[in-house]
Image: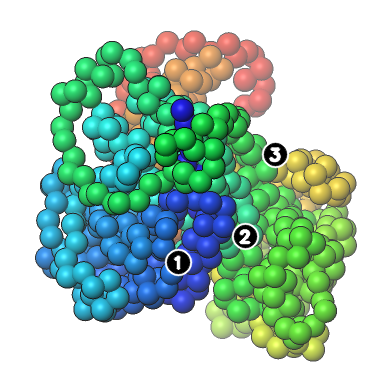
Amino acid sequence: MGHLITLATSSLNQWALDFQGNMERILESIAIAKQRGATLRVGPELEIPGYGCLDHFLEGDTVLHSWEVLAKILSTDDTMNIICDIGMPIVHKNVIYNCRVIVHNKQIVLIRPKMWLANDGNYREMRYFTPWLKHREWEDHFLPRIIQAVTKQTKVPFGDCVVSTMDTCIGVELCEELFTPASPHILMGLDGVEIITNSSGSHHELRKLYTRVELIKEATLKLGGVYLYANQQGCDGDRLYYDGCAMIAMNGNIVAQGSQFSLNDVEVVTATIDIEDVRSHRTSKSRSMQAAGSAKYHRIEVPFPLSSGKFGEVDGESILNLEVGLHEAKFHRPEEEIALGPACWLWDYLRRSHTQGYFIPLSGGIDSCATAVIVYSMCRLVAEAATRADKQVISDARRIVGEPEESSYIPSDPREFSSRIFHTCYMGTENSSAETRKRAKDLAAAIGSYHVDLNMDSLVTAVRDLFSFVTGVKPQFRAHGGSNAENLALQNIQARLRMVIAYLFAQLLPWVRGRQGGLLVLGSANVDESLRGYLTKYDCSSADINPIGGISKTDLKKFIAYARDAFDLPILTNFLDAVPTAELEPISETYVQADEADMGMTYDELSVFGRLRKVEKCGPYSMFTKLIHEWGTFLSPLQIAEKVKHFFFEHARNRHKMTTLTPSYHAESYSPDDNRFDLRPFLYPSRFPWQFKKIDQVAAVLPDRSNRDPIADKTKTD
């Protein structure tokens, strides 16, 4: 005999401090859940104020307005005949907690504070909140008068409790608590909790979703039970993109999964499960023995059944036999993630910043090409949503392109939409090649951007002549006999002037085209160049936002290869075949500037250095010892030592550039963005004398295990 329960979880595109919009999306998700017959609805973490409020959580206004929104939700009939799990900050005894508020029939059933806070990587929850340290304990929380007026309640339970309905038991877990070794769902499950809700604010990172899915499946595999995962979706006002993917799991299997990247502001995932399957899964003797001796949770009783009891009932029990639809979790390849995640982030940023489009200097190289193709991917997503008659997307698109709301304009053609909102410019000098100029022009034509081609030699010459007039000396490129200092300064003039021109054109191109407003300038420095410091401060990589600033060169090449076929852009082959170059020095018969030669290391090596430095937490010496094992078969200890020392020297002397890094889409676990993710000094002892000396001492005595040809090596050196 089955007990069928329809459950709903959601992904909401909540925006920090957008209380009105956030409330509307919460109410819409509840309405959809009820329409589908759900009796339990779960929303993302801190969904009322938005997860990304940061230091605004320390302001009393944020808590006050959250209570006001909750009062409006409770004053409607939306919470009638459904249990809703809603997130907001709450002050209890003068302490701010990250909480879930469980409501039913216009009443607050329980306030459950978060016990394990996310406090590393991109997260600093302990800066704003305090963890609830009284596990399996609860207290009375006296409600503010605006809530008392609606619910007629004076106080409600506050703490680590579970909710007992007429037919099952519900426990609450919050985001980070799933990732901890001793997750709360373990003890709750042993005490008879059958349904676990998890409300998260989990951001996208390349290749990260697999970990999340496996943890959710594992949470119910040994233990048995149902797990409802809700997540924030979209750009919440910062560098992060929350990638949704709400899902429902039961007994170690995924039974429902939402989209990972979507322009939908509200997405509700539902599944009808038989709670008897959980009870059957839990019949093992070892589990029963552990459960019999487990700690007890206080149960808050709700006189409400989650099972409908309306169809095929005999004495209140359903006789309908339902087979839950199991399926494999869907994962995007990293190339697809790059095509979708940053594109969704760009759309949120564009529509919420109330600007009229994007501008990017196209260099003819692969980085600015990848950035442009991501914008084109955004236009494709907008066109697809418009074709599905997505009213919100169509309304936002009309406003952005300057069409009135009552217009019949539908952005159904990505190239046509790109021509309205995307502006590109090739800024050539005497050092630029005809090949890069043509590649930039051909790419712009392929994706439909409004393209400008200019030569800025007169501007560069004017600045150079100004310096000569003031100082009496004229700097020369190295190719013309100049010093390294002169050569670098002349390169930087071009790079920084491009930034000035970019902002001039971004402000005035809409005016030139007879439109109001301005454009957001996009940067295009990849994560590896930032890590190495291979960029000029305040050059054309300095911009409003950068969609590829957290993506490696290696992954960008794979993305371009993918987009060439998936987006039907054969022009991208020319970018894949080109040698990466800054084109800031004169080209001669014997010298062509190449990025990897300039950096003294390859992009693949930079990815390895980045992961070891950040993810594996290696200093210079431990990085050297690890690479001895990884690279020892093709490089000698002395060669590895030189590479490690060169990387740390360049990273240290350029670390100050990270303080001005353009806000970038976070996609890589070794991002050097020091604004929050990579908290390290920006002034270092440039050559790490103690560390480098130890590396040299060890490298000198280690045997050479590499399979290299010493004669060939000598020839290369000569």
Q: Amino acid at mark 3?
A: Lys
In this rendering, the label closer to the viewer, 2 or 3: 2
- Where does label 2 land, which residue? 264
Q: Is residue 510 above or below residue 611?
A: below
Q: Is residue 459 above or below residue 603?
A: below
Q: Position of residue 156 (x, y in %)?
A: 19, 61
Question: Which residue is depicted at the point 77% across and 46% down?
Answer: 563
Q: How many marks?
A: 3
Report which quarter residue 66 is drawn in: bottom left
Q: Is residue 557 above or below residue 548?
A: above
Q: Position of residue 463 (x, y in %)?
A: 64, 78
In this rendering, the label closer to the viewer, 2 or 1: 1
- Give the number of the disc on residue 78: 1
In what quadrant of the picture does the C terminus appear? top right
Q: Is residue 267 visible?
A: yes
- Where does label 3 land, which residue? 558
